Image (cartoon, rainbow, N blue to C red):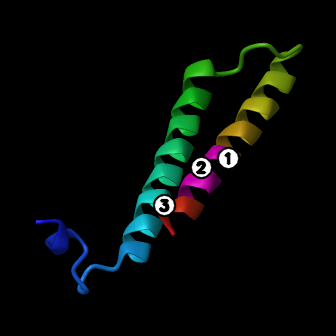
């Protein structure tokens, strides 16, 4: 049975890269939802909160887009 797991038709490097890509995507999606959950907390002014929130949200979405690619 162990021979079947390591058969020549299986590209273990590609499998490893796919797992790493999925982990990166999950991480970036988690950051998007954390950003949405946290909202605009811990900032001095409303304008500062809005700008900080939008910057963090855009960065998180960019990470998801990059990881999907």
- What type of secondary structure mainly makes up the magenta span? helix
Nearer to me, 26 or 35? 26
Nearer to me, 58 or 63? 63
The answer to whether the residues at label 3 and label 1 have Cβ atoms under 8 Å apart is no
Give the alpha-carbon distance from disc 3 to disc 2, as whole Å: 16 Å
Q: Secondary structure at mark 2?
A: helix
Give the alpha-carbon distance from disc 1 to disc 2, as whole Å: 5 Å
Q: Which residues are magenta?
A: 60-65
User: Mark on residue 61?
Assistant: 2
Give the alpha-carbon distance from disc 3 to disc 1, as whole Å: 20 Å
Neighbor class of circle 1 (other Cα within 10 Å; few <14, some 14-19, many 20+) is some
Q: Which residue is mark 1?
A: 58
Q: Estimate the x, y position of residue 11 in percent, counting from the top left.
A: 34, 79
Nearer to me, 7 or 32? 7
Q: Quadrant of residue 36?
A: top right
Residue furthest to the left in view is 1
Question: Which mark sits nearer the N-terminus, 3 or 2?
Answer: 3
**On the picture, is 31 further left or further right than 54?**
left
**On the picture, is 17 further left or further right than 54?**
left
Question: Which mark sits nearer the N-terminus, 3 or 1?
Answer: 3
Q: Secondary structure at mark 3?
A: helix
């Amino acid at each position: 049975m162990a021979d079947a797991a390591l058969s020549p038709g299986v590209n273990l490097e590609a499998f490893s890269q796919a797992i790493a890509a999925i982990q990166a995507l999950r991480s970036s999606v988690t950051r998007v939802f954390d950003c949405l959950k946290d909202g605009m907390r811990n900032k001095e002014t409303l304008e500062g909160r809005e700008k900080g929130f939008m910057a963090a949200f855009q960065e998180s979405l960019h990470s998801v887009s990059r990881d999907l690619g």
